Amino acid sequence: MKDIVISGQMKGVSVDRATRTAEYNMIKHWHPECEIQYFFQGKRHFFVDQQHYAVKSGSLVLIDSNQVHNTYSDKELFHDRLVIHFEKQVFENATNSLGIDLDEFLQEHRGLIQIPQGDRALVESFLIALAEELEQKQVLYQTLVKLKFAELITYLIRLKISGAMHALPTASEIEMNDLVSEVGHYIRENYATVGSLDDIAKTFYLDKCYLSRIFKRSTGYTITEFTNIQRIQQAQRLLEDSRLPVAEVSHQIGYENVTYFNRVFKKYVETSPLQYRKKKIAYQKSLREKNNH
C-alpha cells in the first residue's frame, strides 16, 4: 500500500514523498528526466546501470538522464522515500551561477550517496522545503525550488570534498566488477550480433553458469535482459533519427522477428515502436514551431 505524504510539480520538475508497507518491485526502465531518491526510513535495493546499491535511512540515489535503473523490496517492506524527477535545463541557470556544471556533477556523483547521520536533518530540510514549495505554489515558488536544489547540490559537492561520500569496494569485488564490465562492454559493442549465453561464455573462456551468476549479482540483469536493453536503446535512436521502417530497425538491432521486437520494445518503453516515433516527431515539430515564434 502506498500513502502519499506530499506531491507537487511545476514545468520540468515533479516531487513525490510516499510511504509503502507492502512489497513493491519496479521493472528496469529509463527516462530523459534525471531522478533523485532519498530515504527517510526503510531499506530497499537499487540497480543503476550495472551497479547494485542497498539503500537505507539517509541514502540518496542520483540517477542521470536515460540511466537504466530499477528498485525492489528488501525483507523490511516499510519505507519512507522522496522522489524528484527533473529536466536538467530547469536548474542549469541556478547551478551555473554557482560555477557548477550540472552535467559534470551528475556524471561524477550519480549512484548512491550515504548522508552522514549528523547531516541528515539539513539535507531533509532542503528536500522537504523544495517539496512544499512545489505542492503549495505560493508567490515565487519556482525561484525557491531552484534555490533549494542549488543548496542540495552545493552540500553534496562539499560532502565529496570532505571524503565522506562513498565506501571503497574490496579487492575481490573490483576483480569481479572488472570482468563483468568487460562482458558488458562486449555486449554493448556487439548488441546486434552477440550470441547466446553459451557463445558469450566461450568468448571469455568462462563457465556459462558462473558468468550468468556473477553478471546477475553485479548488475541486476540477466545476459538476455542486458542485451535487450542495449538493442532497445539503439532502436530508440534509429526511430528518432532515421526514416527506416520498423521492420528494418528490428533487423538492424538484431531481432529477426518484428513481432518479438514490438513486444520487447513495449515492455521497456511502454509504447509500440511506431507510436514512439510518432510521439517524438510531434515533439520535435512543436519545438521547431516554438523556436520560430
Image (cartoon, grey):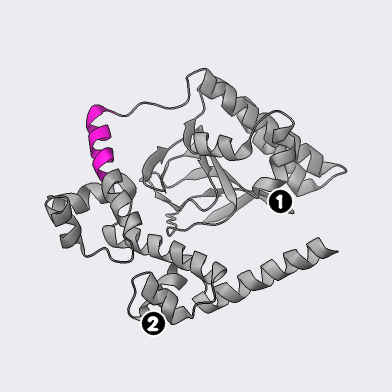
**In the image, is residue 255 above or below residue 236?**
below
Q: Is mark 1 on a helix, strand or loop?
A: strand
Q: Earlier in the sequence, mark 2 or mark 1?
A: 1
* Residue 136 rendering spot, x and y as whole percentages: 79, 47
Amino acid, disc 2: Thr
* Residue 224 rendering spot, x and y as whole percentages: 29, 62
Query: Label 1 belongs to which residue?
Result: 8
Q: Distance between the residues labelled 2 and 1?
A: 39 Å
Amino acid, disc 1: Gly
Image point 17% across, 61% down: which residue? 199
Q: Tell me the magenta residue range.
A: 170-180
Is residue 291 rendered magenta in the image?
A: no
Q: Residue 259 carries which label?
A: 2
Q: What element carries label 2?
A: helix
Which residue sits furthest right? 139
Q: Which of marks 2 and 1 is in front?
A: 2
